Image: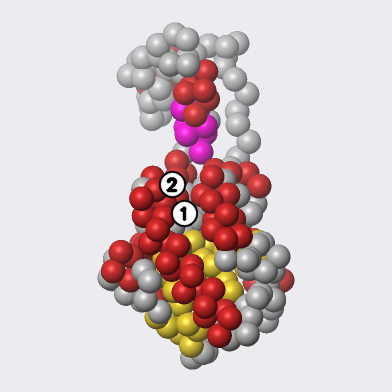
Amino acid sequence: MDSAGLRELLTFYADAGVDEPLWDMPADRFAETQQEAEQRAAGRQQPARPAAASAGNRPAPSPATPKAAVPDDAQAARAREIAAGAANLDELRAQLEAFDGCNLKTTAKSTVFADGNPQASIMLVGEAPGRDEDLQGLPFVGRSGKLLDRILAAIGLDRSSVYISNVIAWRPPGNRDPSPLETEICRPFIERHIELVAPKVLVTLGNPSTKLLLRTQTGIMRMRGNWAVHRTPSGSEIPTMPTLHPAYLLRNPAHKALAWRDFLEIRAKLDAVGSA
């Protein structure tokens, strides 16, 4: 394995929470230490502890890390209550950064809130941060973000004239898919986020954000290119265009033509509402 591959592997293990190396010498985890044998013989039996390396070679204990929250319906209900109490975007960001009810936060480096202009007429929502986004604390800054920037530029937009966020604020370890319950816990925050921004046009990037925000089980290939409606918790209706995620387009460049048609529709809608 070359150095780049080894670096990627080590990064994956670190993101997954593996923080201890293997010992140089094997340890017999079933062996009983001499002290434990003497205590057992004296009638003071204690639970057996696995034999480890000698004290001289043992590394210093790692500092305590926050315990992961067990995702459940109670956490989802708590998230709904907290998100509903946010009066503005600053409050929502602070509440999201303080929220400890989603276990994804314990392995992420950053809470990725949003980027762009919150006064913009158009808001785009993806699924979850990737590695680059987690490091920089901003959505869509990696390869897919660069493609998104080029697509936006082609219809006369940039980060100063759009607002961008994700359904999930924390990078799942190893870039795995968020679980349905993790997504449900994060739903109230992104729904309140959209409600506070109140864009004239909403764009859902990819299958997960489309299904969540439009409350549908229909796949993105059937949804894309067709205007739908996102209903906020307060009952407002926002015209919504589902389209393909830039990461998908990087893997399937032939489908860029489909996304281009969608963004031409988005440009026409913005012109019709007198925006951007």
Residue at the spot x=58%, y=49% of the render? 146
Viewport quadrant of the C terminus: bottom right
What residue appears at the point 40 percent right and 58 percent down from the top-left corner? Answer: 257
Residue occupying the point 38% across, 25% down: 48
Magenta region? 9-15
Badge 2 element: helix
Q: Amino acid at mark 2?
A: Leu
Badge 2 density bin: few <14, some 14–19, many ≥20, Cα 10 Å: some
Please identify the dominant SS of the magenta region: helix
Q: Give SS at disc 1.
A: helix
The answer, for residue 174, to whether it is visible in the render is yes
In this rendering, the answer to whether 38 lies above or below 13 is above
Q: How is the image coloured?
A: secondary structure
- List x then y, in percent, for residue 266: 50, 73
Q: Which residue is mark 2?
A: 250
Nearer to us in this view, 146 or 6? 146
Task: Let me know if residue 11 is in the magenta part.
Answer: yes
Task: Choose top left, top right, bottom left or bottom right for residue 36.
Answer: top left
Whether 34 is drawn above or below 169: the answer is: above
Q: Nearer the viewer, residue 74 or 103?
A: 103
Residue 73 inside the magenta-drawn segment = no
Residue sitting at the far bottom: 235
Image point 55% across, 85% down: which residue?
272
Q: Is residue 176 above or below residue 53?
A: below
Circle 1/circle 2 CB separation < 8 Å: yes
